[in-house]
Image (cartoon, rainbow, N blue to C red):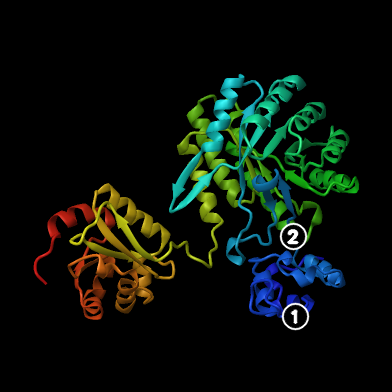
Amino acid sequence: MARRSITETSPIEVYRLLPRTNCGECGEPNCMAFATRLVNREVSLESCPPLLLPEHDSDLADLSALLAPPVRAVRIGQAEREITLGGKYVVQRHEFTYHNPTCCALAVDDTLAREELVQRLRTISEFSYNYIGRDLRLDAVALRSATGDPDQFREAATTIAATCKLPLVLCSPDPDVLRVGAEAVPGRRPLLHAADRTNWREMALLALDTDSPLVVSAPDDLSGLRSLTKTLRAWGIEDLVLDPGTFVGPGLAHTIRNFSRCRNAAIRDGDELLGYPLLGAPIAAFAGEELDPVRCAFDEALTASVLLSRYADILILQGLEGWSVLPTLIWRFNLYTDPRKPVAVEAGLREFGSPDRVSPVLVTANYALTYFTVESDIKAANISCYLVVADTGGLSVESAVAGRYFSAAGIAEALESSGVAEKVDHRVLVIPGLAARLSGEAAEATGWKVLVGPKDSSGLGPFMKERWPPGPA
């Protein structure tokens, strides 16, 4: 029987299993509000102290089962660097917000000289790109045994442990090689890749001995994948990650089908043997006969973006060039934002350059992409100004104007709350060109002279040279 979807779980069902003390210790005004947030996966059961008391053990177990995701959550790493894989509730993003963003692990080989290995590790650890106010980073390091030599693998793992704090994936078909690697990083709880039909016994013992999560690999064989999962579960191993195989180029469609079948079977059909996080290996693009590094990196980026959508929970990558990594990280960011909540910045007053009492005052929406685009264009044009960011509910200017979230009254309120009137001697406001129809109402509501700026903020430089300072009101 299929597990019920999280979208079919009623807050009333959750509420009935709570202590119903309305004590407020969870930070919510009452238990019904807490139940609603539990269903929306905005809080955890541990946030309710009374629920953790011994007399509520049975209710806690029932709630844990009711709210458990069809795709299990598996943790790798340690302490503040711990990453959760899986924990998915739905197949389609519009059904419910995706949680636990796909882990992007960059590969290193044990063939690298120590200096070269250290340099690559630092590049991976320090990689950061600011995208609409969020820092996009890489999440883990995957150490591959290219030599098959346990001593060399141990040396590389030791270097990683001393240089890098990111979670680890240890990759080798040889259990003896993986064992020395795991022993070289005590307490790091690496993900072990991988158990297959030839080595599963040794891999199972290694996972049990080191308390590490284990990848189950059966390329293009979902029946074999289920069988191996069932066997490993019988051995007492619960932290599993499934690798259905990654094929690039002509085989990409086949890969998508296998990943989609796994996720649909877990969530829609309630197949517990396939209800585990999925591992994709776009790095396979570098394994073919094609040796052109640019082409390989392109194929890897393409495969990674597709697997993010269908439905990888961890990716192993090779290319570290910005043009190949950034599309993956940006698409992951967009995919894992809450579709119910637009990405917004805090409303208020911003200052750019060295504004004085005659500097221009501009207004914009608090939609993150709008704000950071305007910010970038102001800086590029070297404009010293005040920017009033109005609360438009996280909507862009055009959408907010159409929905009346960006209105004359809202502009007046944003001006007043910002305190910008105390910083300038003039009363001239520049509004976005896409809000031109508000100019008359805004002038009446604010008492300021209103200039209609360019529709695209890239035109602010020429606009200010031509129109600022303005003539008498």
Amino acid on which disc 2 is placed: Pro
Mark 1 or mark 2, earlier in chain: 1
- Spatial CA span between label 1 and label 2: 30 Å
Residue position marked by numbered label 2 in the rendering: 70
Residue drawn at point x = 29 percent, y = 77 percent: 408
Q: Nearer the viewer, residue 441 or 288?
A: 441
Is there CB contact under 8 Å for labels 1 and 2?
no
Q: Where is residue 271 in the image (x, y as percent from the top left)?
A: 79, 57
As helix, strand or loop, the secondary structure at mark 2 comes to: loop
Q: Is residue 232 left or right of residue 285?
A: right
Q: In which quarter of the image is residue 388?
A: bottom left
Q: Quadrant of the C terminus?
A: bottom left
Q: In this view, does 394 lie above or below 83?
A: below
Amino acid on which disc 1 is placed: Thr
As helix, strand or loop, the secondary structure at mark 1 comes to: loop
Q: In which quarter of the image is residue 50?
A: bottom right
Q: Is residue 216 left or right of residue 325?
A: right
Q: In this view, does 249 lie above or below 97?
A: above
Q: Position of residue 138 (x, y in %)?
A: 56, 41
Q: Looking at this view, name the residue that lies furthest to the left.
A: 472
Residue drawn at point x = 76 percent, y = 61 percent: 269
Q: Which of 178 and 280 is in front in this view?
A: 178
Q: In this view, does 272 lie to the left or right of 417?
A: right
Q: Is residue 226 left or right of residue 360?
A: right
Q: Residues within 10 Å of mark 1 (few under 14, many from 20)?
A: few
Residue drawn at point x = 81 percent, y = 52 percent: 273
Residue position marked by numbered label 1 in the rendering: 21
